[in-house]
Each structure stands twice: as C-alpha cells, then as structure tokens.
C-alpha cells in the first residue's frame, strides 16, 4: 500500500469525483454508504457514475475506503483525513 499526498494527486481539483465520493459520507451524515448512494456523487450522468465506480475501487485500493460487504463502504481514518484536509474547498 502506498501512503502520502502523492496517492491522491487528482484531489487538487475540489470538484473531482473522487473527492465528491469521499464527501458523500459527511453529506449523508452516515458512517456507511452503499454503492448506489455513492453514485449520487455522479448525478444522473452515466459516464460520471462509471467514474464514481472507478473512484470507489481506487479509494479502496489506496486505503481511504473500506469494503463492508454487499456493496457497502465506510471511510477509513485515511479517508476522513483527506476530507478534513480539503474541508475549506468547494
């Protein structure tokens, strides 16, 4: 597993889909979300929903999300740290 800021270079853009996925947990006020709830980060655009799916897989691989089974995911400490560090951005 890799660590450090270099893992999430794409998060420099506050509108990036990966950051939007991470922020969904706070927006929904829940510790655990299912994939269909996370798709809301992409809206109704099928391409953006595919980007959400890719972002979720990448975030799991990088340790920012944890799979909970049956398409449920939760933020890890690393994921919460990323959200906190980007709190002042759009």
Image (spheres, rainbow, N blue to C red):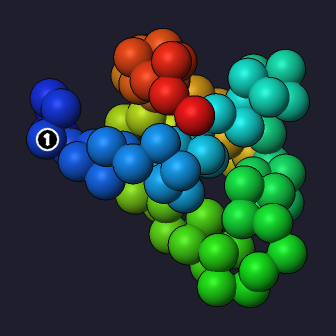
Relative placement, left or right, of 22 versus 33 is left
Position of the N terminus by quadrant: top left
For residue 12, above or below residue 26:
below
**Is 75 or 39 nearer to us in this picture?**
39
Q: Nearer the viewer, residue 9 or 58?
A: 9
Residue nearer the viewer, 42 or 64: 42
Residue 35's x, y, as percent? 76, 57
Residue placed at 84% from the left, 20% from the top? Answer: 29
Say how many tags the image has: 1
Can residue 31 be seen? yes
Question: Residue at 74% of width from left, 85% of height from top?
Answer: 46
Rendered image quadrant of residue 73: top right
Res 80 seen here: no
Image height of 66 relative to 57, above or below: above
Left or right of 5, for residue 79: right
The residue carrying mark 1 is: 6
Residue at image point 47% right, 42% down: 14
Q: Position of residue 32 (x, y in %)?
A: 76, 31
Query: Among all residues in the image, which is located at the extreme bottom?
Result: 46
- The residue under the point 57% across, 34% down is 90
Is 12 on the left or on the right of 44, as rendered?
A: left
Q: Give percent across and percent down for residue 33.
A: 79, 39
Q: Where is residue 70 shown, x and y percent of the image?
A: 78, 54
Dot 1 falls on a residue whose secondary structure is: helix
Say whether residue 72 is left or right of residue 15: right
Disc 1 crowd, CA 10 A, few/some/many (<14, 14-19, 20+): few
Q: Residue 62 sits in which quadrant?
A: top left
């Amino acid at each position: 597993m890799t660590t450090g800021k270099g893992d999430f270079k794409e998060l420099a853009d506050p509108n990036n889909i990966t950051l939007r996925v991470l922020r969904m947990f706070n927006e929904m006020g829940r510790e655990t979300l299912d994939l269909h709830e996370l798709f809301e980060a992409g809206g109704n655009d099928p391409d953006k929903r595919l980007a959400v799916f890719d972002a979720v897989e990448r975030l799991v691989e990088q340790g920012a999300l944890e799979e909970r089974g049956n398409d449920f995911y939760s933020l890890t400490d690393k994921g919460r740290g990323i959200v906190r560090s980007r709190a002042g951005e759009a």
